[in-house]
Amino acid sequence: EGGIQAVKPVTGVPFCDAYPDQCEIMAKILSVFFLSLLLLFFLALVLMSSLEDTANRRIFVQLKVVHALTKNLVNNTAQQHRLQKDLLHAVFPKKIAWELTQLSEEQQQQRVGTTALPSPLDLDHCMIGRTRADFHRSVTIVFTDIVGFTSMSQMSSSHHVMEFLHELFTTFDGFVEEDKNLWKVETIGDAFMLASGLNHDVASPMTSRRDGSESLSDNLRALTMQELRVSQMLNDQQSRHKNKARKDKSGNDLYFSLQDAEIIAPEEETSSGYAYSAIIFGKMALKAASEMIMPNGERCEIRAGAHTGDVVSGVIGKVMPRYCLFGDTVNTASRMESTSVPGRLQVSERCHAFVPSLQWEERQNLVEVKGKGMMKTYLLV
């Protein structure tokens, strides 16, 4: 009760019995020492607990920051991956875009084994430039060209010309997006190139539009078996001519080996639907262009040409790769456009055989086509 003052020496100890005052002082000193040591130990425990709590809080905050950064990195990487895939699907057909994004199983296993984070597309390991060629039968190619574009470009500023072409081709893009049969191949200057019948999508090309509504080709109903047999006969005849010409010339200089190419051959009715979609696009393009005014103040007028035949497709190059079509069909379609009448769509006899039910005007005189000779052509009414 008296604290340190109540400390008394222990009886029975010789030293304490001989020197009771000194023994009492020593007992009080030892009591103060042990009490101080106990107090210091308690303060040390409190300090260590506080330091540990601070460290734990700092680690917890750091873990939360790392978790947030990791989550943000995963989301950004996944978003980048989606954007890259969307870009490939916007530039290339669905089947080609899928091929370009494929990695070998070994590379995929290495990625899974080294990191749990989704990785963006590694364009260095994509199959760009190494995709096989695809051989397509009965594809309809359409070319359009602006009449008087050169003189208009000389009279107008480049900015206004570019703005006009963007508006025109955006309108054409809208027509392409409405029909799954169509694929925009490229634009070169004022020329717009479109293909119908590449048949890259899994779904049947005669089913639906991209928006789920009825396709343009579903409106085709009047084709007879006789017309289809005629078109098939023309197809076989031209194929034999091409094969013979290919045997006469060495195939070593070709970029693609047709023996290794995947042959995509649609049905006859489907080919007619493809041709129909292409012709309807040409008709809508002519109408849309005629309603636009060029930068020089004149009304826009375009020529259009179409041809149906076999083509080879593939991706060319690694830097700025392009999905290209090759073959005599492309050249003939371009000639159909260049020899067409302003404001009209001209088609070859072969293309006409697939869609004879439409209103056509047979040109009275044969058209001289460079590299092809004289050809019988038709103008869409």
Image (tube, helix red, strand yellow):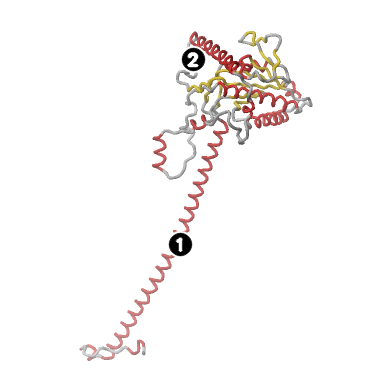
Residue at 40% from the left image edge and 42% from the top image edge: 114
* Residue 336, horizontal then vertical, whole percent: 65, 16
SS class, disc 1: helix
Amino acid type, callout 1 = Arg
Whether 343 is drawn above or below 246: the answer is below
Q: Residues within 10 Å of mark 2 (few under 14, many from 20)?
A: few
Whether 237 is drawn above or below 294: the answer is above
Res 152 → quadrant: top right
Q: Work out whether mark 1 precedes mark 2 in sequence or the reverse, and give the earlier one.
A: 1
Taking the image as shown, residue 353 lies to the left or right of residue 135, namely right
* Relative depth, front residue between 274 and 151: 274
SS class, disc 2: helix
Please tell me whether mark 1 or mark 2 is closer to you in this view.
2
Quarter that holds the N terminus: bottom left
Q: Where is mark 1, residue-wise?
A: 57
* Residue 303, horizontal then vertical, whole percent: 70, 20
Q: Where is mark 2, residue-wise?
A: 253
* Residue 40, horizontal then vertical, whole percent: 37, 74
Q: Is residue 294 visible?
A: no
